[in-house]
Image (cartoon, rainbow, N blue to C red):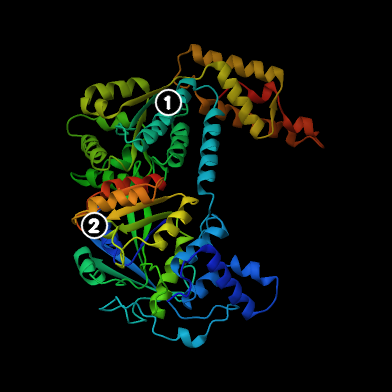
Amino acid sequence: MTNCAKPSANCAKRLVNSMSVSNDAKPGVNSYSLRDIDAVLSAFEEGRLTPAQAFSLFREMGPQFEAPPGQGQDAESSNASRLREALNELDSLIGLHSVKRLVREILAFVQIQKKRARQQLATEHLVLHMIFKGNPGTGKTTVARIMGKIFRETGVLERGHLIEVERADLVGEYIGHTAQKTREQIRKALGGILFIDEAYSLARGGEKDFGKEAIDTLVKSMEDYRDRFILILAGYSEEMNYFIQTNPGIRSRFPIHIDFPDYLPDELIQIAELMLKKREYKLDPWARNHLYTILTKHASNLDHNAGNARFVRNIIERAIRRQAVRLVDKENPTREELMLIRREDIGEGL
Amino acid sequence: MRRCIVLGKPNAGKTLFVLHFAEFLHAKEVTIKFQEPVAAPRKGTGVDPEARTGSAACSLDPVSGSDPGAHGRNPGAGFGPSTSEHFKTYKIQDAVRDLTGPRPHTTRCLQSVVLELPAGKGKKTVELIDTSGLTDGIHQDAEIRRAMSQTLSSVRAAHIILHIIDASKAGKKGAVEAMGDVDYQVAAFAQMRGGYCILANKIDLPGARDGVKKIRDEFPGHIVIPISALYKEGFKEVKAFVLREL
């Protein structure tokens, strides 16, 4: 047993000091040995230290945490930075003010629920199933993808990935096949988001349609895997409203409804300019005016495509191709010419 | 994965706590990773080779753990001193029968289980590491000293420290389970680290309530959770603590 009657930090220090001096009598090594965890451990194994002394030596070595090999220490800080990144991505979307506000609301809610749980206060169960209503090309999928990232970084979802499906992925060919297919998709989405595009089509097709079976399976899984995934139903506003009205069970299970308004012509111009900037092109003023005219004309026609970012993207991509045709025969075009999109490139839209 | 180490004096109930905590988290079976110390001299520390030649086998693996080939041993893996690891899956009650006992130093190597705790809309995993008990004095058995040295080295790599103190023997001088120097040193070490709480165990025994009070008095400023590892009392609070630190 120990020859130190009163084990203390000093005593242990003396022990280790004397040991390393006797081993390799170099003066500089003493202080190093004292800081060396291996030296303490082997002194301990040889029966020269008590556990208590070893701990007091550890304490002198300082509080730094030794990560086992292969594990990052800054997981939390990178979590926070990835969350910031996802939020920046959301903020960089043009328009969608109500959507952004709602995402912030949900985020704040999640964080406060966590803090309440720490204080042992009653917490609301996080039901985050959502319905996205809006015309095509209004940013539903983009927002869902960003939400996945945000929820992963806040710890709501394990993986935060997005599984995007439509009616054909869920509905089967014979009785019983549908439930099987639907469950398969849900299994893939566990830990992330299941995003069903044009969800209203599940309720179309009358009594004998298998879409009903898919809805039933989804509703069941929402209860069974309540904590494992988030279900988002997306579709056109009118069809979705009808869908919700005809399936009262659906409405109560989706506490969050987000409307994606059509983009205004001004916002669409901003989107177009952002897209061109990313591709290192720019519009000349006449082209800009012309694009504006096309967009307002579509808006007044109450076209489904009116407030549609995808529509703008197609116009832009077409304009880029036309610009290429215009310049291909020209020898030595300048840098400026290669970047500029002119009125004739835009043409009459699509 | 976060590491959560369970330590304390011998016979404080560490292994029983780990196994019953796994059961409390709805595990029916546990796959335990045994990390046995391997006697290998560290360079530059002047180890006497003769002192390290004893058998380092985990004395506690009665059935099959002694077959090196069958479990894919992995010498040198892990951290701290060199270890060889192997896995074994138990039903909880079998593990309790085989791995716990009334005598001190039943556990002689690191035994870790991976547990899942619900967090948000998902689960978080934590590695719960059971360790060999720490004595106040220097133990005469080299094998046990090596096992304790494993405990010491893994403490520094752990994120969460659960320190088990036997509340029924807290005030009794002389018992091997009684609070001693090592308990105070662990608490002082953990104070600057965070992620630390004291589990006052065996509150089902008579006199333990006074023991809990004594522990609270002796370790002011630390979280003390009274538990009974045998009857799974106080586990809800332990789970909340671990979740908070994850």
- Where's residue A152, x and y in %? 43, 42
Q: Which residue is mark 2?
A: B202
Q: Which quadrant holds residue B102? A: bottom left
Amino acid on which disc 2 is placed: Lys
The front one of B59 and A154 is B59
Front position among marks 2 and 1: 2
Amino acid on which disc 1 is placed: Glu
| A348 over B173 or under it: above or below | above
Q: Residue at x 54, y 13 (%)?
A: A297
- Where's residue B174, x and y in %? 31, 67
Q: Residue furthest top?
A: A300
Q: Residue at x 27, y 68 (%)?
A: B89
Q: Viewed as shown, does residue B198 lie left or right of A325?
A: left
Q: Viewed as shown, does residue A163 lie left or right of A337?
A: left
Q: Viewed as shown, does residue A149 lie left or right of A15?
A: left
Do we see residue A251 in this rendering?
yes
Discs 2 and 1 share one subunit = no
The front one of A70 and A231 is A70
